Image (spheres, rainbow, N blue to C red):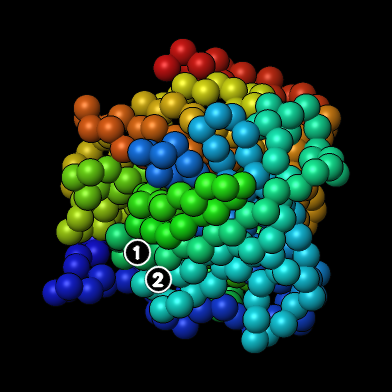
C-alpha cells in the first residue's frame, strides 16, 4: 500500500528508473518504449503517442489524433538512435521531470483517414495534413511498477518472460494532460485525462496471444490501471493498481475485456478487479474510437490491421464505476487468422464480454 507524503507522491520506483536509458547491446531483445494516451471529453478528441527502440539503433513512433467524427490523423516515423535526443523526426515523447511530468508532441504531416479504413488494411500513402501538438503530461497518481531485476535469485516467473516485460522495468501512471492541437484551420485547447506506460529491458511478443491494457480516471480523483497478458505455455499475467486520491493499492485480481475484431469489437465491454482493502469492483465500458495496428516480432508495428497476425486496437473509453462516469483508454490484442485452438478456448470469454 502506498500513500501520499505531504504534497508529493510516494512513487514505487526511482527517478533513474523513469528516465530514458542507455542501450544495452549485450542484452538479447533489449528495447525501450514509452506510451502516452489521453482523452478530452468536452471536445471528443483523443491522442495516442508511442515510441519504441528497434534493433538497438532506430526509434519507431506511431502518433495519432482521434477526431469525434470518426477520422484519425496518424503517422508512423523512424529516426536513428541519438542518446541526447530520443525522438523521431516528427514526434517527441520524453521525461521533463522523471516520475512527475512528461512531454508529448508532434510537429509535421499526418495522414487523415477514417478509423474504419484502418480496420480494412494497413495505412496507405496519400494526401497529408499539417499537424502540431504540444502536450504537458503531469502525474495524478504515484508512478506504479518496479525497476530492473537482473539477479536470478530474486526473479519471479514473470521476470523470466519477455512477453510481459521480463526482467526489465515496467512503469504506469495516471495523468492530467493539457496543451494545444493545431490542424487545418483549427486550434484546440486540451484539458484531458490520460495515462502513460514506460518500459525498458528484454522485450518480445514471443508466444503472447492476447492482451488487455486498460485505465480510467474519474472526477472524484479515483484512477485505475489493469493489464492482462495471455502467453501460450505460461501462466496468465494479471496486474494493476487502484488509486483513490490518497492511497495506492495493487490489484490482487484483474479481468479485462477481450477483442474479436479489427474495429474494436465488442465496443461495449466490462472489466473487474479486486483490491485488498475495498474488495471486488466492476466497471462497464464503451469504446469511443479505434485505431488498429499490427505488431511484429520482436517489436514494432504498422498502422492498420493486416489480414493475419498480432492485431491490436487502441482507443479512448467511457467508463462507469459505481455510477460515476470517467474516461480512459483500452488496448486489446488478439492473433488474427491463426492459433485456432487458442481462439476456440477463448470463445466463451469473448461471448461473455459481448453480453455486458
Q: Nearer the viewer, residue 159 or 100?
A: 100
Give the vertical position of 96 relative to 169 (above or below). Answer: below
Marks 1,2: beta carbons within 8 A: yes
Q: On the image, numbered disc 2 is attached to which residue?
A: 101
Is disc 2 surrounded by few (<14), some (14 to 19) or many (20+) residues within 10 Å?
some
Identity of the residue furthest to the bottom in this view: 84
Please tell me which residue is depicted at 79% across the width and 75% down the height of the picture.
Answer: 80
Instruction: Report the quarter where the C terminus lies.
Output: top left
Of residues 196 and 346, the one drawn nearer to the viewer in this rendering: 196
34 in relation to 234, above or below:
below
Question: Of the residues under marks 1 and 2, which one precedes in the sequence?
Answer: 2
Q: Image check: 194 left or right of 116? A: left
Mark number, residue 139: 1
Image quadrant where residue 231 sits: top right
Residue 126 image position (x, y, % from top left): 84, 42
Does residue 226 appear in this view? no
| Residue at 22% from the left image edge and 50% from the top image edge | 221
In the rendered image, residue 284, in percent from the top left (x then y), is placed at 36, 26
Residue at 53 percent of width and 47 percent of height: 186
Q: Secondary structure at mark 2?
A: strand
Residue 202 at what x, y percent from top left? Answer: 67, 67
Amino acid at each position: 500500500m502506498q500513500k501520499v507524503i505531504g504534497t508529493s507522491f510516494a512513487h514505487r520506483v526511482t527517478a533513474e528508473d523513469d528516465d530514458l536509458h542507455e542501450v544495452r547491446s549485450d542484452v538479447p531483445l533489449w528495447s525501450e518504449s514509452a506510451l502516452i494516451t489521453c482523452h478530452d471529453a468536452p471536445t471528443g478528441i483523443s491522442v495516442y503517442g508511442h515510441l519504441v527502440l528497434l534493433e538497438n539503433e532506430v526509434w519507431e513512433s506511431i502518433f495519432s489524433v482521434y477526431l469525434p467524427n470518426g477520422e484519425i490523423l496518424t503517422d508512423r516515423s523512424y529516426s536513428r538512435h541519438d542518446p541526447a535526443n530520443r525522438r523521431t523526426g516528427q514526434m517527441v515523447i520524453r521525461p521533463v521531470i522523471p516520475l512527475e511530468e512528461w512531454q508529448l508532441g508532434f510537429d509535421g504531416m499526418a495522414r487523415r483517414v477514417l478509423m474504419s479504413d484502418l480496420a480494412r488494411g494497413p495505412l496507405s500513402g496519400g494526401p497529408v495534413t499539417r499537424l502540431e501538438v504540444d502536450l504537458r503530461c503531469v502525474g495524478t497518481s504515484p508512478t506504479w511498477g518496479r525497476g530492473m531485476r537482473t539477479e536470478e535469485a530474486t526473479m519471479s516467473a514473470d521476470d523470466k518472460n519477455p512477453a510481459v516485460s521480463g526482467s526489465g522495468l515496467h512503469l504506469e501512471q495516471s495523468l492530467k494532460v493539457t496543451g494545444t492541437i493545431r490542424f487545418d484551420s483549427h486550434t484546440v485547447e486540451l484539458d484531458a485525462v490520460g495515462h502513460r506506460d514506460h518500459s525498458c529491458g528484454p522485450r518480445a511478443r514471443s508466444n503472447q496471444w492476447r492482451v488487455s491494457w486498460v485505465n480510467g480516471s474519474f472526477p472524484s480523483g479515483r484512477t485505475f490501471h489493469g493489464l492482462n497478458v495471455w502467453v501460450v505455455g505460461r501462466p496468465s499475467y494479471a496486474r494493476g493498481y487502484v488509486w483513490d486520491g490518497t492511497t495506492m493499492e495493487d490489484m490482487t485480481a484483474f479481468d479485462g475485456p477481450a477483442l474479436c475484431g479489427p474495429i474494436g469489437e465488442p465496443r461495449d465491454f466490462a472489466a473487474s478487479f479486486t483490491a485488498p482493502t475495498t474488495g471486488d469492483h466492476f466497471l462497464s465500458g464503451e469504446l469511443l474510437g479505434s485505431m488498429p495496428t499490427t505488431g511484429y516480432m520482436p517489436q514494432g508495428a504498422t498502422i492498420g490491421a493486416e489480414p493475419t497476425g498480432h492485431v491490436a486496437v487502441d482507443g479512448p473509453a467511457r467508463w462507469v464505476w459505481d455510477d460515476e462516469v470517467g474516461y480512459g483508454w483500452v488496448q486489446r490484442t488478439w492473433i488474427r487468422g491463426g492459433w485456432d485452438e487458442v481462439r476456440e478456448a477463448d470463445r466463451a470469454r469473448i461471448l461473455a464480454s459481448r453480453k455486458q
